Amino acid sequence: MTTDNSTEPVSATDTTAPKPNRVHHIRAGELDGHTALSGHTVGSKRLWMGLVENPPLSATDNHHHGDSEAGIYVVSGHPVFVYHDGVREVRVEAGPGDFLLVPPFVPHREENPDPDVPVVVLIARTTQEPVKVSVPELYRHEVADA
């Protein structure tokens, strides 16, 4: 086992290449855009993680995240996640403390219907970088299962 006895923290603003075999600490306010953990910021091999804020009365476009799973934790606000189950449009209303899973290739959109309060979510995806593929509708696109 390799031990790193360095007392210097590694941050997202460090311009050197990410160092393997150590704990990476991203301090509040050091996010690279919305991204905290990725292949780019810390050398992650299978994980992207970041905070996303959706302003009041907003909605994303219809999209999916390729073959990546997306785990979502609602920090604040009351987002609505919309997808199509093959028969009808389904609206999942969430609130602070809720967790959601969006499976690979499932088209969806996030909405914030609140006129005053932004939504903040923590997202973890099973890729090194964020993948977002815009689609014209919420119907599931046929893909070959791996």
Image (cartoon, grey):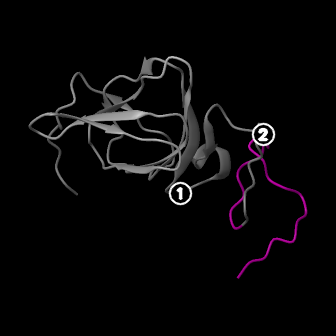
Q: Amino acid at mark 1?
A: Lys
Residue 138: percent from the left, percent from the top? 22, 30
Residue occupying the far left of the picture: 87
Magenta segment range?
A: 1-21
1 and 2 marks in contact (CB < 8 Å): no
Q: Residues within 10 Å of mark 1 (few under 14, many from 20)?
A: few
Residue 131: percent from the left, percent from the top? 42, 38
Q: Quadrant of the C terminus?
A: bottom left
Name the residue that disc number 1 marks. 45
- Identify whether 1 is placed above or below 66: below
Q: Left or right: where does residue 83 sit relative to residue 79?
A: left
Q: Quadrant of the N terminus?
A: bottom right
How many numbered discs sit on the rendered protein? 2
Name the residue that disc number 2 marks. 13
Q: Left or right: where does residue 83 sit relative to residue 60?
A: left
Residue 39: percent from the left, percent from the top? 58, 48
When asked about the image quadrant of residue 20, the answer is bottom right
Q: Earlier in the sequence, mark 1 or mark 2?
A: 2
> How far, Cα to Cα, is label 1 from label 2?
19 Å
Q: Amino acid at mark 2?
A: Thr
